[in-house]
Image (spheres, rainbow, N blue to C red):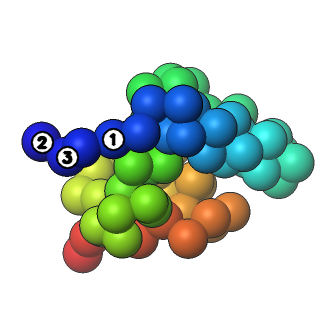
Amino acid sequence: MLPVRPLFEWEVAADLFIACQANGFTPANTNDLLIASVAIGKHIPVLAHDSDFARIAEVSTLQLAA
C-alpha cells in the first residue's frame, strides 16, 4: 500500500495517456496508467507481465523490474 495524491495521480495518468497516443499506442486499461503514475512518482519499479507497462515505459520514466 502506498499513499497517493488522487488528483495529481489522475493528472499524471492523463499525461501518460496523451504521451502513449502521441506515439501510436492506446493503453487498454486506465488502471495501468494510474499504477504507472504512482510508480513514477514514488520512483518504484513495476513488476508486470503486461505489454502495456512496457509500452508506457517507452514514453515515460516508468521503471520496470527485471
Which structural element holds mark 1? loop
Of circles 2 and 1, the one toward us is 1
**Residue picked out by circle 2:** 1
- The quadrant in which residue 1 appears is top left
Q: Amino acid at mark 3?
A: Leu
Q: Is residue 34 visible?
A: no
Which SS class for mark 2? Answer: loop
* Residue at position x 45%, y 61% in the image: 40
Q: CA distance from mark 2 to mark 3?
A: 4 Å
Residue that label 1 marks: 4
Q: Is residue 31 visible?
A: yes
Q: Residue furthest left?
A: 1
Q: Position of residue 9 (x, y in %)?
A: 50, 40
Residue placed furthest toward the right: 22
Question: Does residue 50 appear left or right of residue 3 in this picture?
Answer: right
- Amino acid found under the numbered disc labelled 1: Val
Residue 15 is situated, as x and y percent measured from the top left of the image, at 72, 45
Residue underneath mark 3: 2
How many numbered circles does the render carry?
Answer: 3
Mark 2 belongs to which amino acid?
Answer: Met
Image point 50% across, 24% down: which residue?
Answer: 29
Residue 49, disc: none
Residue 2, image x, y percentages: 19, 46
Q: Please report contact status of discs 2 and 3: CB closer than 8 Å, yes or no.
A: yes
Check the picture and name the quadrant holding the C terminus. bottom left
In front of the other: 26 or 19: 19
Q: Disc 2 to disc 1, how far (Cα)?
A: 9 Å
Q: Label 3's element?
A: loop
